[in-house]
Image: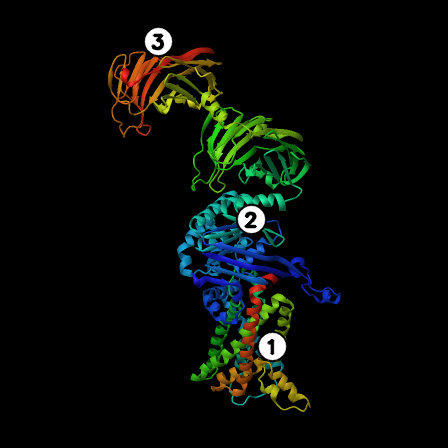
Amino acid sequence: MLVIEAKHVTKVYPARRGTRIMLGRGGLGDWLRGRRTTSFSALRDITLEVAAGESLGIIGRNGSGKSTLLKILAGVTLPTSGEVVVRGRVASLLELGAGFHPMLTGRENVYLNAGLLGMRHAQVDEVFDEIVAFSGIAEFIDQPVDTYSSGMYVRIGFAVAAHTNPDIFLVDEVLSVGDEEFQRKCRRKIGELREQGKTIVFVSHDLGIVNTLCQRVVLLNKGEMVVRDTPQKTINFYLRQVGRDRGVHTFTDGALEAIHCDGRLSLFHRQEEITASLGCQMALTSLGQRHASTDAEWDVTEAGAASCAASGRMTRLPLKLEWRMELAEGKLTWRAAIECEHATDLSLIELILYLPTSYLHWLYGDYAGRFPDILPADAGCNVIVAPEVSARDAAALPAEGAPLPPLLIRVTPHLRHMGLLWANSEYVSFSRLLISYARFPQEDCTFSAGRHDVLTLEIDTSADRARIEERVRAERSVRSGRLSARFELGKVRLAFDDQELTASLHLYSSMFIEHLWHDSFSLQWSPVRSDGRRMTVSGESRRFPFRQEWEIEAVEDGIDLRIYLDAWEPFEAQEYHVSVVIRPEYDHWETDHESGAFPPFDPALSVWKHLNRSYAPGSRAKALSSTLPSVIFEATARDLGFRMTPLNTRPDQNARVLQALRPSEMGALRFEAGRHLYFAGQVRVRPKHET
Amino acid sequence: MSVFLYNSNEQRQLRRLPRDLIRARELLRDLVSKNLRVRYRYAVMGFLWAIIEPLALMLVLTFIFTFIFSGRVPVPGQEGTPFAVSLLCGLIFWQFTAAALTSATQSLIDNQNLVKKVHFAREVVPIAATGYPLVNLGIGLVILVGLHLGLGGIIGPSFVYVFVVFSIHLMILVGLALLLAVANVIYRDIGYMVGVAVIFGFYASPVFYPLEFVTRASDLPWYPWLVRLYLLNPMAELLTAYRQVLFEGRFPDLWLLAWPAVLGVCLLAIGAYVSRRVGPTLSDYL
């Protein structure tokens, strides 16, 4: 059903509105001087329909008639000709905050306002507490609103409109005011209203919000409707056609096309947008305040056919952003630099690449995974891989069949403290984020006057999908017959014929230093070197002066694991262990001294449970299952004195453990500076029928 | 759903006015109470001013006309009524008229943040502005009746005729309020004109003198025309009618009601038509 119909709407304003002469329209003085009234047409022949439950965005430059159209839909003014029909209760937020009387208190204004939106007092009583809670200004609610700040004004205005349970919600640029937290709240509320099937008409300059909140977007230019289509198409049209401006340049090379638009870079591959609507942006944080590149005033300084250089003067920072973008051979190279006019403190520089959610898999150095789904409850960014890996390259793979190329991204930092991470955005932006950032500590955050290169980002769209997949898979694993071992951030996953044998923490190691366990997966791991039979990898502790080097080699029926500890300063540990955490299907265990059954998990227990009684040193532990191949864990470095222990994990981890524990006989284990053998052993599997 | 149907083409139709007003009745109440609250918000004595204001004015005028200009014209039938009471009667109804017209004229401009942002029947605003001086009138009326009774006057069942006169009075005011409020938005000159007219009206209406003071015989050759012109001011008839009801305890002379009634109906019709016509697009001028 159509809830909003506008037919051939034209609006002509008397000229006074535009010119705002003090004498007023047709003032006597004007009339005597022969100046007759002129008119200004704000809208020309707009025909528009909005169905129930639809969310429509209206975009356009300043003065294109967006607000006028919204006013006409809200019934605040009438079209000069044409007809508007609106079915349903309308709540409108025009030009921030509905009608407030400055001398009334917040409470009185809430009632007055809700009354204007068509609510009875009794109905307002019901939602009053909710309104106040949402606005977050409970302590000022009985103060006259002329004591309110403009932010509080908007908060309460939005809260009232959002809680009057309208069928149709008309919003004009509310989200550009207020602090970030409130903006998020508003966006979430608008998202909720949309989920509830309310009709939303939304005017905004923020193309990102329009893109995520609206199903259709109308583009107005000088009072005429130019396009009405999906958000993506309308926004692209806007950027290309209407947005021709000093800060806009489009450049192409082969299948690639890039648009720089006022501090946002959008990339297209065969007309498909690779970046999400927010494109690729930069943000600087100084003195706790975040400044986005889209807030800067941009000038395209060099507009080449396949390249673009632009400089953006930050409006509230004494510096310029200098971007140089180039397309060549399916690759975008983007060099970002800042030029400070005088010394400036920056605590954080971020470069954010927004990708659509059709990118499903991430690669990060040698690690890979699948992006989790973005849920409506996600109010903030969800970091997926933090910079535990000091890798400089990343890749993203689209879903099978998506018309997007795989992306290979290489970041070359030119500053210290640079990191890279993959994240999921909050629900409203609904995109994948690759953020490369530099966080500067207090004592090292001053940028002297002059030019500073920030980083170079290369996005390669010509990479072969199969090769990316293969590269990631192959380089981190060794195979021995039907067994494969795959290294993953300080854990080794074991699989037999692609059936995983390990679970939860897989094969890992942990050291007890200064009363805390330091797990191998919290070390900072370097990329893996592997040839398919043998791989080596080293991980550096962030807190203690050592590095672990793991060597994993395929042997018959299993893998050989050697761990060396390289300390550059002496340090002490109480004890350490290497554990194979296996699936709960294993039901029996054997050690050198005893054997027994794995008992059921005890829900009351919140620690791991030792199952052996003998604590004599040993070299062998074995787990058996009726369905899975047996796992034999052997410590070959006998002189280190390992104890072989079977355990049950905590019930929530739901796994069995074979552990080689090296206890400290007396006092602590002391590691002198230098290289030590930390562990040597084997994990072997025996298929069922052989045992 | 059909309850909330908005069609831009119907907004200017006169026949929709009653429905729109009924729908906005709660808003009307809110606006009246808003006006009252705002008016006395930062005043220490608050609502007391509604009582002090007319009383003080009455005392001043009584003093002036008892001791300075003491020549007075007797009104047949009201010989027993003290000057102060008669003056107060004229004063409260005149003050009401003046307050209603001034506040109504500015009402749409004062409430422009409502008009510019929300859709509702614009007529509500000037009507509410006419409505809130009613409270002052009510208080004044209580004082008047008290004073009248205290000084030996009698109030009979004929008091209800006040409401007959008052309803005609109100028609004129609402009609004018609609017309002036809308006109003032487009031509801000109207506000100043009303200000001048209110000052002039105080003297051109029988507030501190009886109507008989004007209508008595005179030697001037064009005097009858001047009286006719004077009588075009409906307040001349209305204030006299109020006095007849209150102090003579009878239904007022019919000729006193005829012209104001005709004028009231016409003004109401014109006001409603103009406000319907221009009201929906008023936000363009604000």
Distance in Å between CA atoms under marks 3 and 2:
71 Å
Mark sitting earlier along the chain (3/2): 2
Q: Residue at x 46, y 11 (%)?
A: A675
* Image height of A567 relative to A584, above or below: above
Pointer 3 indicates a residue of which chain?
A
Task: Give the Cα separation between the discs numbered 1 and 3.
Answer: 116 Å
Under mark 3, the amino acid is Arg
Q: Do labels 2 and 1 share a chain?
A: no
Q: Residues within 10 Å of mark 3 (few under 14, many from 20)?
A: some
User: Which residue lies under the disc numbered 2?
Assistant: A204
SS for tag 2?
loop
* Amino acid at pointer 1: Phe
Query: Which quarter of the rendered picture does the C terminus of chain B lie within?
Result: bottom right
> Helix, strand, or loop for circle 1?
helix
Residue that mark 3 sits on: A638
Quick one: B271 or A691, which is closer to the camera? A691
